[in-house]
């Protein structure tokens, strides 16, 4: 006699069926839309925006606050919904024009400083608040259950925290690792949470935004070079044990290396996360382009497995970013002995 399916298998097949039916319904609803809109919609998803679009219709769009400043008009605050009419077409509002994500003063060359709460900024707040809630909960649980076995959220987070401390930060950041542990731990979980939340339907592409990855890389760059000791700077400007002619060649290479390290951190995270989003959306749009149930089934299977791979990539990218940041800091603070 065959064993009955487990609840996990039933849930998996139910999820797959709903996923396929959603694809089928979307295909029928968008059957008349031109396929060339796919690239535009994919790029729109991975880019930042002044609105947060979840689904079609007025109630499926979150209009975010616009905060702009110019020397000509001063400070203005209003909703980004004022840039759209009832048919969701862009219109001018109060002398401002929104075009390709940039706000300008209509008919004026005056520069506008855009301080708006965009989709990625809103996602940044959500990620930060989630991190604060998680770690305050873990800290409170640790205080209440001191000396006892961890439970709940604490039992889930504690092995990850210990792994990052003992296997990533401590071996690479050197004997003074405790000084940099708060930054590196925050860095890991911020990238991890941002990567995972970005995989949710309708979520913003936070860690796939090059401005965000650049900011994280700049933090590592500043901490590394401010913490650099005498030996670190000596090896850059006057490498010991090297003939003078070679020092003239090594010096520019070492100076360039100071900037290429954070640059590689920035590009690696940005490219990996953005590419994952583009691949997933491209597979989904194959259903709309070919208008085929068979393509829909195939795309659903590929999307399912690539989504699982993206979960793995989310953890790997957070691990790699933290690992290299700890390594750069460790190299800058390492004490060298010359005999």
Image (cartoon, rainbow, N blue to C red):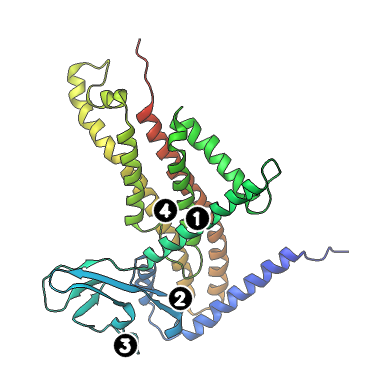
> Distance between the Cα atoms at labels 4 and 2?
24 Å
Q: Which residue is mark 4?
A: 272
Q: Nearer the viewer, mark 1 or mark 3?
A: 1
- Pinpoint residue 59: horizontal percent, then vertical percent: 45, 83
Asked which secondary structure carries label 3, the reply is loop
Q: Position of residue 140 (x, y in %)?
A: 60, 51
Disc assigned to residue 85? 3
Mark 1, other Cα within 10 Å: few <14 / some 14–19 / many ≥20:
few
Question: Label 2 neighbourhood size at 10 Å, few (<14), some (14-19), many (20+)?
Answer: few
Which mark is on residue 132? 1
3D distance between C-alphas at marks 3 and 2: 18 Å
Task: Give SS at disc 2.
Answer: loop
Expressed as whole percent of the image width and height from the top left, the position of residue 245 reads 17, 19
Inter-mark Cα distance, 4 to 3: 36 Å
Local crowd size for mark 4, using a 10 Å CA cut-off: few (<14), some (14–19), many (≥20): some
Residue placed most toward the observer, 93 or 264:
93
Report, in whole angstroms, how far the alpha carbon at label 1 lies from the one at label 2. 25 Å
User: Which badge, 3 or 2, is on the more N-terminal residue?
Assistant: 2
Which label number is shown at residue 241?
none
Which residue: 49% across, 31% down? 171
Left of 66 or right of it: where is 201?
right
Residue at mark 2? 54
Frontmost of labels 1 and 2 is 1
Residue sitting at x 29%, y 77%: 78
Q: Residue furthest top?
A: 339
Q: Would you place residue 16 above or below residue 129 in this image? A: below
Which mark is nearer the camera, 4 or 1?
1
């Amino acid at each position: 006699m065959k064993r009955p399916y487990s609840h996990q298998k039933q849930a998996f097949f139910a999820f797959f069926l709903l996923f396929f039916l959603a694809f089928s319904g979307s295909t029928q609803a968008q059957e008349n839309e031109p396929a060339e809109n796919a690239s535009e919609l994919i790029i729109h998803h991975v880019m930042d925006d002044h609105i947060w679009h979840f689904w079609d219709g007025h109630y499926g769009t979150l209009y975010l606050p616009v905060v702009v400043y110019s020397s000509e008009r001063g400070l203005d605050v209003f909703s980004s919904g004022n840039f759209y009419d009832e048919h969701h077409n862009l219109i001018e509002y109060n002398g401002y024009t929104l075009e390709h994500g940039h706000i300008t003063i209509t008919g004026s060359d005056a520069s506008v400083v855009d301080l708006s709460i965009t989709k990625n900024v809103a996602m940044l707040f959500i990620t930060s608040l989630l991190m604060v809630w998680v770690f305050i909960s873990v800290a409170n649980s640790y205080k209440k259950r001191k000396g006892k076995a961890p439970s709940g959220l604490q039992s889930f987070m504690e092995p990850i925290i210990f792994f990052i401390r003992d296997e990533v930060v401590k071996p690479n950041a050197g004997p003074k690792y405790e000084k940099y542990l708060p930054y590196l731990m925050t860095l890991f979980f911020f990238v991890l949470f941002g990567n995972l939340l970005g995989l949710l339907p309708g979520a913003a592409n936070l860690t796939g935004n090059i401005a965000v990855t650049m900011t994280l890389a700049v933090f590592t760059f500043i901490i590394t070079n401010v913490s650099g000791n005498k030996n670190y700077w000596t090896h850059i400007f006057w490498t010991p044990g090297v003939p003078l002619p070679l020092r003239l060649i090594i010096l520019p290479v070492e100076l360039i290396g100071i900037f290429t390290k954070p640059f590689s951190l920035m590009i690696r995270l940005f490219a990996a996360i953005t590419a994952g989003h583009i691949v997933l959306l491209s597979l989904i749009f194959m259903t709309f382009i070919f208008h085929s149930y068979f393509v829909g089934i195939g795309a659903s299977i590929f999307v399912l497995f690539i989504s699982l791979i993206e979960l793995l990539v989310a953890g790997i990218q957070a691990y790699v970013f933290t690992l290299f940041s700890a390594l750069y800091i460790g190299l800058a603070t390492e004490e060298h002995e010359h005999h």
